[in-house]
Amino acid sequence: MKFKTTQKAIKEGYSDIYAVNYCDACNILAPFEPVAYTAGIYGWNCDVYQFGQYAIATGYRTIGDVVPYELIKALNDDAKTFLELYGNGVITGDELQYNCRNLIYKITDAMNAKRQ
């Protein structure tokens, strides 16, 4: 169950936060539950997914370093394949999470390489 928090708390709680527009990473994040969400005067802003020291914020008004759309699109297409395999009973839920987590680490690796 996710809890409501502030952008300030998210920024203080994670070493790196990656921003993804609403639904751009829906396949990658499908096997995971958000840990928190932020909201403001206009309503819901974003959901926050935790992966170790990293967080991915996805929504209408995200926070963090923006992940390039081309990277997200390519990885989201890969995750769609894993979801189809899971739906057909070819892989287990644990294997689905493992594969999607590896795709998320590709995002973090690419963003870290971009900074250097």
Image: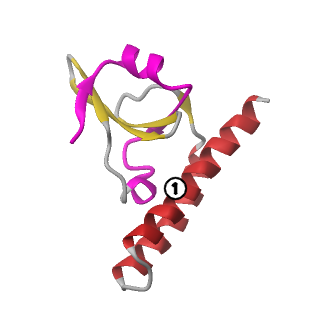
Q: Name the residue under label 1.
A: 101
Region of the chain picked out in magenta, as a range = 1-29
Please tell me which residue lies in front, 3 or 84: 3
Please tell me which residue lies in front, 38 or 68: 38
Looking at the image, residue 109 sits to the left or right of residue 24; the answer is: right
The residue drawn where x is 41% and y is 71% is 83
**Residue 77 seen:** no
**Residue 26 seen:** yes
The residue drawn where x is 31% and y is 18% is 6
Amino acid type at mark 1: Arg
Residue 70 percent location from the top left of the image: 61, 50
> Is residue 103 inside the magenta stretch?
no
Residue 65 percent location from the top left of the image: 56, 29
The residue drawn where x is 21% and y is 42% is 1
Residue 100 percent location from the top left of the image: 50, 60
Near mark 1 (Cα within 10 A), the count class, few <14, some 14-19 or many ≥20, is: some
| SS for dot 1 | helix
Residue 86 percent location from the top left of the image: 39, 77
Looking at the image, residue 112 sits to the left or right of residue 9; the answer is: right
The relative height of residue 17 versus residue 86 in the rendered view (above or below) is above
Q: Determine the image quadrant of residue 115.
A: top right
- Which quadrant of the rendered structure holds the C terminus? top right
The relative height of residue 36 versus residue 76 in the rendered view (above or below) is above
